[in-house]
Amino acid sequence: MDEGEYRERMARDLARWRSERLITVQQEHAILAREGAGAGRAVNALRLGWLVTAVSIIGALVLGGGIVLLFAANWEEMADWFRTAVVFAGVAAAYAIGYALIYRYDQQRIGSAFFLLGYVLYVAGIFLLAQIYNMPNLPELWLLAAAGGFALAYAFESRIVLLISIGFSLAFVFSSIFERYPDPPESAATLIVIGAFGVAVYAIGRLHALRGELDRYGDVYIFAGLLMLVGLIYAFTFDEIWDEIIDADVESYAAPTVVYVSLAIAAAFTAAQWWLRARRIEEHIEGALLIAILAVAAVVATWPAWAGYAILFNALFFAVALGLVARGYVHGDERYVNLGLALVAAGLVTRYIDVFWSLLAGSAFFIIGGVLLIGAAFLLERIRRNVLAAMEPGDDARGSARGGEAPA
Amino acid sequence: MSTPLRRLMLVVALQFLVLLGLLGFKQYTVWTGETVLLAVQPVDPRDLIRGDFVELEYEISTIDTRELEGDDELEDPTIYVELREGEDGIWRAVAVHNRRESSFGDTALIRGTYSFDSSHAFDSPQPDVFRVRYGIESVFIPEGSGGDLPFGGDHTVAVEVKVDRFGNSVPRRFFVDGEPFELKRR
């Protein structure tokens, strides 16, 4: 490792320790100055490192997409044996180059991008090989794609591959339930499986945080689980869904078994993480909120015909958003604060459009909407700054009093 | 062997195993399967092409248990449709079974999944006519060549399908009026 890479690594580690509240900003700067890097230079190097990572990842995805498109366009002209050889050779070559770059030439970022490229080619290979045999887009193909990704992610600590694999797992769940239950009302009820999957993924993330060596994967699961859960709650805030169920005279039904099984699995994961990690009041609140969401989902799955669900899910949506802000504040994690406030803003804009679109003339809608949005943005930014100001390091007593848990 | 290299070898081995498994599963059907010719028609001629594949409805996609031998009442969604070759070379359904039969002479068993409109499920929990999907309804074709298939008129369009002894099936190529029909990229 040369001098520049050492400083970059040091700056990155220091930034992580600062975010984990192990050191203060002043201590970070003092260490950087002590090592002769100078805070400005080291931080610039750190930022450049992230830029290299981002460009490498985008490059790998673009290159993978290009290769896939090239072969897909000429797929029918190739012999079966050649297609198969291309898939295997492409995957092997990408991994071999990635390995050489990381372990022979100490190019961690570029090498990791080639690992990502290898994974992209592996997934593409699954679907291209399936095409040779005219297989339809079976849900199991997504599961195979996810399985290969989980193996790579855990073996080489790749968070982006992990995130993609969780996404493929969701695609498997989504396509499986809709293949099995294509018709309403079962198809509507099985949407709840996605929410249950989101809660389970979130809880799995919390379980990861319990083991030091798995901690770095935890926030990927938590982020993915949150997206799934909030996405489904958001979809349920619209009254059109409930109106359709009421209009269809579906007063009550027992949802397909898969709905209740998925809710039970999600509840088991939630209970496990609650039992194992709950030491403080906010962890009890979080565990109780997740269980409450699952209970509401079970009620909705069984008795879906009620016009009040749209209001209930709006309340739930804003409760989750504000809960994220509160959690971010308590744990000193700016990401939760920003995500929570972004959800609040998205919810307000949605409800404004939902309510006033048909009531106001076009110009009045945009003028009033624009003014309200700017006002809301101003208010949210003030809240955000106040919250972040309260989180500034230096208040060591607060961190100690909370047990010094690393932020998710 | 260093630890990272060993880990990489394991990951690559797992991924190759998945790819080879997928390949082997289907190739087994191609190598060992009975070759049957199934008559097809497009689901909707105007929506024939979706990208670079055609969505097909086979003659055996709709079955009437009253007209077929075998089991009268279907249980699990997975069923086995028994096919026999007709004088025109086209294989047609002659029986339907809930389970795979061990020996069936000059016939072939193809596995499918049946369904019916759930909105009528309470009125008629066991209808006689079923829609069956065999997983061979989408057939990939060279880019822009879908319009070359002479659906309609006096032509008989069929697909050559390999069916193995487990009922798995793989569509291979098109036949028009009993002759192989090669689609070319446009």
Image (cartoon, helix red, strand yellow):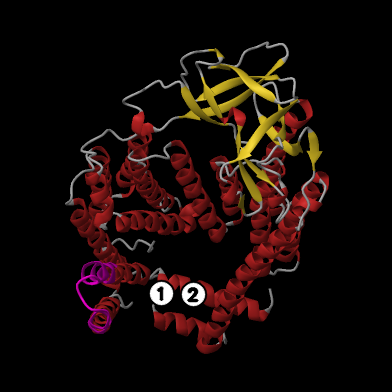
Circle 1: element type: loop
Q: Is residue A66 above or below residue B57?
A: below
Q: Magenta region's main secondary structure?
A: helix
Q: Are marks 2 and 1 on the same chain?
A: yes
Residue type at mark 1: give it: Ile
**Chain containing mark 2:** A
User: How many marks can you see?
Assistant: 2
Q: Which residue is mark 2?
A: A14
Residue B1 visible in the displayed image: no
**Chain containing mark 1:** A
Q: Is residue A60 above or below residue A11?
A: above
Query: In the image, what residue occupies the spot 45% across and 71% down?
Result: A17
Q: Quadrant of residue A81?
A: top right
> How far apart, in angstroms, are the residues tagged by discs 2 and 1?
8 Å
Q: Is residue A49 above or below residue B91?
A: below
Residue B35 in picture, x, y percent from top left: 76, 27
Residue A382 in picture, x, y percent from top left: 25, 82
Specify few, some or many for label 1: CA neighbours under 10 Å numbering under 14, 14-19, or 20 or more: some
Query: In the image, what residue occupies the spot 74% across and 62% down?
Result: A70
Q: Quadrant of the C terminus of chain A?
A: bottom left
Q: Quadrant of residue A27?
A: bottom left
Q: Quadrant of the N terminus of chain A?
A: bottom right
Residue type at mark 2: give it: Leu
What range is drawn magenta here? A347-368
Q: Is residue A293 above or below residue A406?
A: above
Residue A354 in picture, x, y percent from top left: 25, 66
Kindly check if marks 2 and 1 are in contact, taking CB atoms under 8 A apart as contact: yes
